[in-house]
Image (cartoon, rainbow, N blue to C red):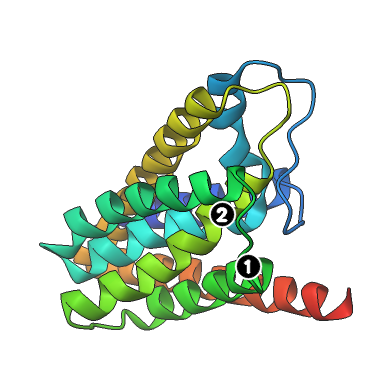
Amino acid sequence: MRDFAKCSVLGVIILATAMLATEPAVAHSVRNTTTGFTTGIIHPFSGLDHLLAMVSVGIWGAELGPPAIFLLPIAFPLIMAVSGALGVIGIPLPAGELLVAISVLVLGVLVASARRLPIWAALAIVSVFAIAHGHAHGKELPISADPLGFTVGFVLATGLLHLAGIAVGLLAHWPSGIVAVRACGLIVALTGCYLLFGHAAT
């Protein structure tokens, strides 16, 4: 039990470190990269909003258990890839960046409260947010990057972030890990409030 407590604390430290290591900006900017795949891999880690949302999808899926633990991390990247293509070709998404910020707040609240919803409702929420995040990625495709390589890269990186979230979320199966998982959700939700405040100020 003591080992699980240590793992829980470690999970919170890792999440907090990731938050401090990324830029607190809604837009994802990638500099000095020329290949599409490499740019795509780096891209999700360059924005605090995307990083936290992707990890939260994994945590929430783990909290909900099967089949959500499998379906949410699969649905999100697939829908995001399609929406990213729309962003690449210039189809607008009204209030897209606002929706991205809202996704961080909502997912944080869902994780912190361990909110249990029907699988169709969970998929609907994740799908809406996937559209917003995918479009944001697509419209920020660097001119020098190959669109296909970029898409494959950011979808793969998103999957890895989902897996990291699942690993954190599984700690909630033990009493000593529940507090850490709830704390992670609270941190994400507060960050979502910060992002929304920044969006409203611009």
Instruction: Tell me the quarter of the image containing the C terminus.
Output: bottom right
Q: Compared to 80, does 67 lie above or below? A: below
Of 16 and 120, nearer the camera is 120
The crowd level at tag 1 (other Cα within 10 Å; few <14, some 14-19, many 20+) is some
Q: Which mark is residue 83?
A: none
* Residue 14 place in picture, x, y as percent: 53, 47
153 to 134, vertically: above or below: above
Q: Between disc 1 and disc 2, whose residue precedes?
A: 1
Give the vertical position of 71 relative to 190 (above or below). Answer: above
Question: Which residue is most to the left?
Answer: 66
Label 2 sits on what residue type?
A: His
Residue at which label 2 appears: 135
Q: Which mark is residue 96?
A: 1
Relative horizontal placement of residue 71, taking residue 98 as reference (left or right): left
Q: Residue at x 40, y 33 (%)?
A: 156
Q: Are marks 1 and 2 in contact (CB under 8 Å)?
A: yes
Q: Amino acid at mark 1?
A: Gly
Residue 96, quarter of the rendered image: bottom right
Residue farthest to the top? 35
x, y percent for residue 66: 10, 62
